[in-house]
Amino acid sequence: MTTDENATSGDRPEGALGRLLEAIDKEPARRGPPPVDKWNPAFCGEIDLRIAADGSWHYMGTPIARPALVRLFSSILRKDPERYVLVTPVERVGITVDDLPFTAVEMAVEGSAGDRQIAFRTSVDDVVAVSRENPLRFDSDERGGVRPAVRVRGGLWARLTRSLALDLIELGEERETQDGVVFGVSAARQFFPIGRADTGDRP
């Protein structure tokens, strides 16, 4: 099945995705993302929808080629304790996420040191500024490398592309803390540690 349809036309995905779109259409127009944290419909099982590690969306093994459709479904994505779900007021279905659901594809930096501001744009056009509420985190891969991510909303995070990760780490600095000398990135008057600089953990 091809899912490269216009989300607002009559030619829309069938099955579970079509039902989700229909439920979204019935919601009144609003500013900002839907209040998915307030919706708690019955869980209706898993559907064959997967977000790959590179941020691409696949339905029944076929990439969803239309960005507008991906953005629409990303707006009703939520992280429950046990799984990622797409949720509407009437239905909640589980999906597969290989790594993190979003990918940060653009970074803007303004200022330096304690006054530095960092913002990201994701592949689904969310824009998020690094802050206490939207922190950076630095995961390790199987080879000991660093894989940065930024919180977008709720339990949803965006993985930085490799090029952005390198650019972000270039902004790093060493700070003396009660745990020793730590290498990390400062933004929005917060310091986000990457690793101990005095033990070889610095990337």
Image (spheres, helix red, strand yellow):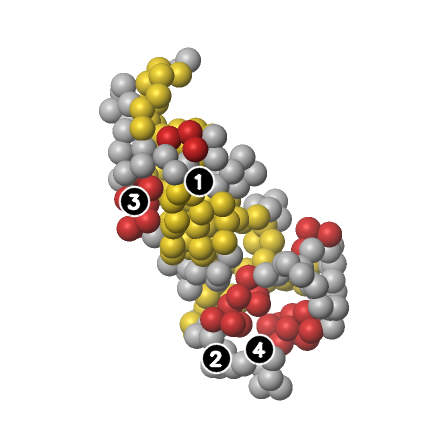
Choose mark 1 or mark 3, whichever is in front.
1
- Image disc number at residue 117: 1
Q: Residue at x 47, y 71 (%)?
A: 67
Alpha carbons under labels 4 and 1: distance apart? 35 Å
Of the residues under marks 3 and 4, which one precedes in the sequence? 4
Q: Residue furthest bottom?
A: 10
- Image disc number at residue 7: 4
Q: Position of residue 39 (x, y in %)?
A: 73, 55
Query: Disc 3 residue type?
Result: Asp
Along the viewing direction, whichever of 15 and 116 lies nearer the viewer: 116
Which quadrant of the rendered structure holds the C terminus?
Answer: top left
Determine which residue is flagged by label 2: 4
Along the viewing direction, whichever of 35 and 14 lies nearer the viewer: 35
Query: Disc 4 residue type?
Result: Ala
Choose mark 3 or mark 2, whichever is in front.
3
Query: Disc 1 residue type?
Result: Gln
Determine which residue is flagged by label 3: 167
Q: Locate residue 194: give its quadrant.
A: top left
